[in-house]
Image (cartoon, helix red, strand yellow):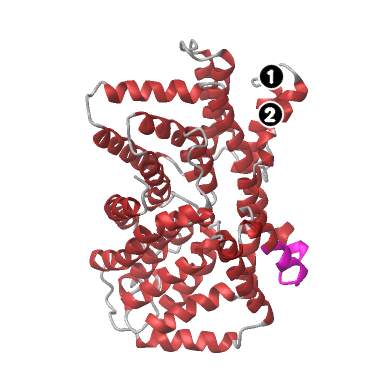
Amino acid sequence: MPSSTSDFRLLPALIAIAIGFSIWFIPTPEGVSAQGWLMLAIFVATIAAIISKAMPIGAISIVAITVVAVSGVTSDNPGTAIRDALGSFDNSLIWLIAVAIMISRGLIKTGLGERIGYYFISIFGKRTIGIGYGLAISELVIAPVTPSNTARGGAIIHPIMLSIAKSFECTPDNGNTNKIGKYLALVNYHANPITSAMFITATAPNPLTVKLIADATGSAITLSWTTWALAMLLPGLVAIALMPLVIYLMYPPEIKATPHAVDFARERLKKLGKLSRDEGIMLGVFVVLLLLWADVPAWIFGDTFKLNSTTTAFVGLSILLVTGVLNWKDVLGEKSAWDTLVWFGALVMMATQLNELGVIEWFSGAIQDGIVSTGLSWPASTAILVLVFLYSHYFFASTTAHITAMMGAFLVVGLSLGAPPMAFVLMMAATSSIMMTLTHYATGTSPVIFGSGYVELGEWWKAGFVMSVVNLAVWVVVGGVWWKILGYW
């Protein structure tokens, strides 16, 4: 029996294992190898274990790596099998996210993230809707260097939101969440999916999406940090501009004018004092990262000054370590970074093996045949794909698991149906973040903010559905026009 401190949950684990064996014992379909079918069984069992929380995702990933190596699904040679199982850990995108999470620790440790938040509240905070925009803009400003959207929305912005609500004596215990807290909590949350869609480095699963897009297009489309940011810029800004207003119309706060919030933010800024040495260095690193990720030095001085995105992240982390803004204990203590490194590597490995063993081709072919049989045109067919991908997130408690399970096949199908390649992959990339709006378990940020008690469950789901429709419409209309202007289709 597992100990009382064990992460292991027997019933969910048994269910996941049963699902895996059930798939394995199904006769292998024509066009799929026995190894490919076994890999699919392992993969689906892993996803089921993640969804049911049989263990933390990192622990499940270790078990999955072990099963892949021991089963010999990729090779009969034990040495080759373990190399295949560990093969994704040399993927630079995995290290980009892990290192960027370590860098984002500096925003919290130095207090720069808090300062940025209160600065925007001091500017926009005269009215409640202005506070909403202040929270949303604060999210946007720090998003490029905080790939943990949970850290950004839950650990940096959420405490600011709570302190403002409590300054108006608005708490769930007082039974007056409609006063201002409900509105601010929803804005706090719904800024998170939008900013996550705007930068590769704004949420951990985005590099996985980049990898799957490259696989689906035979590397014909490999999204760089700059290409992603430019493509998502205009629709993201429009979505950020609309979101606080939509939430305001749905759940209007009782308090409309909030001059006290400006004074409160200024008091907090005064308490923080002048910009400290460490905050200044963190701000400098922030700027350097953005310039290098955007290839600005390369544009000015030539390709000699062009750096890989992951190399840039290592440069930023190295500066923080050398200057003492972060120390090695900070890096070692950033558990989410090391956790991400493990589970990301395992899921990328399995997705890659499914592709190499022909399972993705078989699965996408089956989906394609079903859609083609309807006789729909490519716009209608791809619309169905996007909608199914988006709203199937009601059944997932992990964006990473959802993307790993479905994105690869859906990309292949959409591209084969005749959709403009660049526009379609960008829409799918945006949708992988838009789907975070839906539920109180959609991503790591949602239980943090929902758990503060300012929003009832039904209200959360209603706001989530409405915002999913609004965001999707923005990306289809504004994004479609913007991508046309950029020459992407």
Front position in the image: 281 or 465: 281
Type of amino acid under label 1: Ser
Disc 1 crowd rating (10 Å Cα; few below 14, some 14-19, many 20+) is some
Q: Which residues are magenta?
A: 316-330
Relative side of 1 to 145, left or right: right
Q: Which residue is mark 2?
A: 84
Rendered view: 326 above or below 18? below
Residue 322 part of the magenta segment: yes
| For marks 2 and 1 on the same chain, the one whose residue lies earlier in the sequence | 1
Quarter of the image for residue 105 reads bottom right
Q: Which mark is residue 75?
A: 1
Relative side of 281 to 379, left or right: right
**Which quadrant does the C terminus fall into?**
top left
Quarter of the image for residue 244 reads bottom left
Rendered view: 317 above or below 345? below
Which secondary structure lies at badge 2? helix
Quarter of the image for residue 270 reads bottom right
Type of amino acid under label 2: Asp
| Residue at 38% across, 39% down | 421
Residue 193 seen anywhere in this rendered image of the structure: no
Percent from the top left, x then y, of residue 400? 51, 43
Rendered view: 276 above or below 197? below
By secondary structure, the bulk of the magenta-drawn segment is best described as helix
Q: Are marks 2 and 1 in contact (CB under 8 Å)?
A: yes
Which secondary structure lies at badge 1? loop
Rendered view: 78 above or below 311? above
